Image (spheres, grey):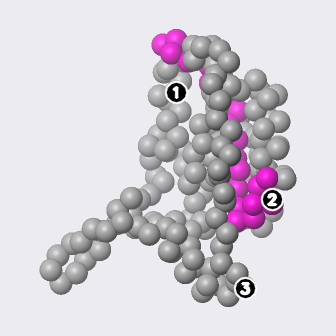
Amino acid sequence: MQYEYETEGGLENEPVKYIEKTRSYYEAQGFDRAYKWADNAGIPWHRLSKPLIECNVTFIVTAVPDGTIPKLSRQGGSFALDEMPDAFRTDELSWDKQATHTRDRESYIPMVALQQLAEEGVIGSVSARYHFVPTEYSQSNTLNSDAPAIRDACLADEVDIAILVPL
């Protein structure tokens, strides 16, 4: 990702240094230790057990629908896909708001395109629910609470493929 800034000589572009920005953020907050990045050496990828044309697909997002879950009590949850909002609340999250925005939902959650793929027979179906996992800096909360709840919801909905949308 690039961000643009103005200098005396005009506009300049340079990469966004997320790891450096995160370390600096935690240091400025006075945390005793540096942020520990997740170690994903054992990613559980696997081949689909059936053809794509038979698969049920859902979305898992890290942004909350406006007004549904207070920031201080955020826990993962499941919502009706047909009630997906036009925009998600992301203003309280830390991300580069100068380089991008979340006003065009279809640019990051291509729900209409996915529904078209189902209608065209490319995928089997779109799940009746999508799921929310909070942007959480506690790996323990994610691994022990939110992830199992979303896994169970996906199993209950007979989801075969989950498209992860980190915002």
Looking at the picture, which amino acid does disc 2 mark?
Asn
Can see residue 8?
A: yes
Crowd class of label 3 (few under 14; some 14 to 19; many from 20; radius 10 Å): few
Residue 96 to residue 63: above or below: below
- Nearer-the-camera pick, 41 or 47: 41
Asked if the stretch drawn in magenta spans residue 134, the answer is: yes
Q: Is residue 116 left or right of residue 161?
A: left
Residue located beneath label 1 in the image: 114
Magenta stretch in the rendered image: 119-143
Q: Nearer the viewer, mark 1 or mark 3?
A: 3
Q: Nearer the viewer, mark 1 or mark 2?
A: 2
Q: Is residue 22 left or right of residue 43?
A: left
Q: Residues at badges 1 and 2 in contact (C-beta under 8 Å)?
A: no
Crowd class of label 2 (few under 14; some 14 to 19; many from 20; radius 10 Å): few
Image coords of residue 144 (percent x, y): 84, 53
Looking at the picture, which amino acid does disc 1 mark?
Leu
Secondary-structure class at tag 3 = loop
Residue located beneath label 2 in the image: 141
- Nearer-the-camera pick, 94 or 67: 94
Looking at the picture, which amino acid does disc 3 mark?
Asp
